[in-house]
């Protein structure tokens, strides 16, 4: 691989205009956000760890969202390194850590990509081992895991973070038992993946958990793991915050609701949870002296509002851009109330026309209006206007 393919001519070029193809065997993608204190040591250890370029052609790509002098430090430290180093500095940190990694993947044209942190919590000497394990076993994805024999999470600061990390791992494994089979540490940010497996266009990363995103959306065939000891941070501070935790939950919901059936189940569960605010409002209003009939109607709106907020933030989070929020809220409320209006004549029809008993007729009407309301909500509130007819023709929904 020739050096000029990995030029450092303008390392802080925000747009990375006219990117050359990044060839060679391995692209090491390292997301950075204010990591100036770690760069020199990281590159020094990588220099020691990576075999000579003839054995494993390797290049380092930093994808940087820093507000400090990290890009300049990278440029300086890169000058006397045996392998090519470049830095892509983004003007807007879209998608956070995960977004940065996807930007790096899009520019990598090597057989393998390796993703690791810049703060030396991921031991650089394992980089060749990760790729080697993939080559040896034919795996598409090799995860550095803290949870298999020989690994540990020594560097996770404090019992609180250990508990949160463990709970997040269980939750995630429980939600994606199939996609994460063979991955004991889906929260790991240190892994090697064959570039050919990654379909960068289908990715919608949200925050920190880029391995989860890749494993669920790209479905690598074979997975291998290598144990590692999660080290202490070398310099600086962790960038993970409580807000990052909320983003993680939203990311889980978006991944889990990627198929129409899963979305319908989510829609139903949210609908059920709406009984709580509905009944609470009814209790409040009737105790405040309102007649129960108008109170029913007002209380129903509390349930509708609750459902709307949850559906917006958990289920259709990435589809809110097609309409103004007031438009969506209005349509949502209309459909939710139409459901109530439709249910009574439907029950009457089932009973009077088809001779059904009242209870099964009511149950059938509930299910019918639920399915109708789900389909109508998706089609009339959250689907982009121009793809609606095409989606209806095919009987499926896009953006899965
Ligand atoms: N480009 C970019 N943009 N990089 C970012 C951003 C961002 O918005 N936020 C964080 N980073 C970089 C950091 O500079 C660092 O190199 C790496 O991503 C990890 O960030 P840390 O702040 O060190 O994360 P952590 O130590 O809390 O989390 C680590 O452990 C988790 C497992 O517990 C990371 O490795 C996670 O990927 C991992 O899941
Ligand atoms: Mn870290």
Image (cartoon, helix red, strand yellow):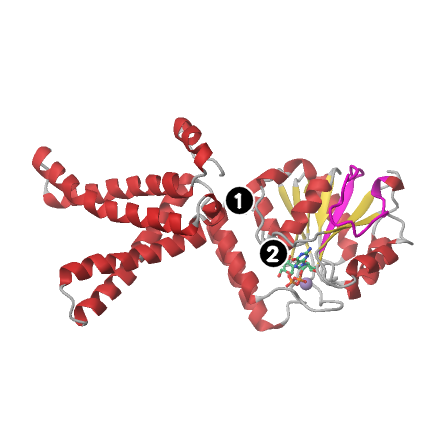
Instruction: Determine if the C-beta at disc 2 is less than 8 A from ligand 1.
Output: yes
**Near-viewer residue (118 or 339):** 339
Q: Secondary structure at mark 1?
A: loop
**Near-viewer residue (89 or 271):** 89
Q: Is residue 307 left or right of residue 324?
A: left
Identified at 17% across, 59% down, the residue is 294
Identified at 45% across, 38% down, the residue is 384
The numbered disc on residue 208 is 2
Q: Which image quarter is the N terminus in?
A: top right
**Mark positioned earlier in the residue sequence (1 or 2):** 1
Which residue is identified by label 1?
A: 179
Instruction: Determine if the C-beta at disc 1 is less than 8 A from ligand 1.
Output: no
Whether label 1 touches label 2, CB < 8 Å? no
Identified at 72% across, 67% down, the residue is 233
Q: Is residue 361 left or right of residue 102?
A: left
Residue 29 part of the magenta-drawn span: yes
**Near-viewer residue (13 or 324):** 324
Where ligand 1 lies, by image quadrant? bottom right
In front: mark 1 or mark 2? 2
């Amino acid at each position: 691989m020739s050096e000029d393919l990995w030029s450092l001519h303008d390392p802080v070029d925000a747009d990375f205009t006219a990117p050359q193809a990044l060839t060679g065997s391995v692209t090491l993608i390292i997301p950075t956000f204010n990591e100036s204190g770690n760069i020199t040591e990281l590159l020094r250890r990588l220099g020691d760890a990576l075999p000579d370029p003839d054995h494993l052609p390797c290049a380092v790509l930093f994808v940087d969202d820093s507000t400090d002098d990290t890009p300049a430090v990278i440029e300086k430290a890169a000058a006397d390194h045996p392998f090519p180093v470049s830095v892509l500095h983004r003007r807007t940190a879209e998608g956070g850590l995960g977004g940065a990694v996807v930007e790096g993947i899009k520019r990598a044209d090597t057989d393998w990509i390796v993703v690791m942190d810049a703060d030396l919590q991921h031991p650089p000497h394992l980089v060749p081992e990760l790729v080697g394990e993939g080559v040896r076993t034919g795996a598409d994805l090799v995860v550095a895991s803290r949870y298999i024999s020989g690994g540990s999470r020594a560097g996770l600061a404090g019992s609180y973070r250990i508990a949160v990390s463990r709970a997040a791992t269980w939750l995630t494994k429980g939600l994606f038992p199939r996609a994460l089979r063979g991955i004991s540490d889906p929260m790991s940010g240190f892994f090697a993946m064959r570039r050919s497996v990654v379909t960068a266009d289908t990715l919608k990363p949200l925050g920190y958990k880029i391995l989860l995103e890749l494993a669920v959306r790209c479905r690598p065939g074979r997975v291998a793991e290598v144990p590692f000891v999660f080290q202490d941070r070398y310099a600086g501070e962790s960038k993970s915050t409580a807000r990052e935790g909320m983003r993680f939950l939203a990311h889980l919901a978006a991944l889990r609701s990627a198929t129409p059936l899963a979305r319908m189940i989510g829609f139903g569960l949210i609908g059920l949870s709406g009984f709580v605010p509905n009944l609470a409002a009814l209790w409040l209003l009737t105790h405040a002296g309102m007649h129960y009939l108008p109170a029913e109607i007002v209380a129903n709106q509390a349930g509708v509002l609750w459902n709307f907020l949850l559906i917006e933030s958990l289920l259709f989070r990435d589809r809110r851009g097609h309409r103004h929020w007031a438009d969506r809220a209005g349509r949502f409320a209309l459909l939710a109330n139409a459901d109530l209006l439709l249910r009574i004549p439907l029950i009457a029809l089932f009973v009077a026309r088809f001779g059904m008993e009242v209870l099964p007729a009511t149950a059938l009407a509930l299910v019918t209006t639920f399915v109708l309301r789900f389909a109508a909500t998706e089609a009339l509130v959250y689907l982009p206007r121009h793809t609606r007819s095409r989606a209806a023709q095919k009987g499926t929904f896009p953006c899965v």
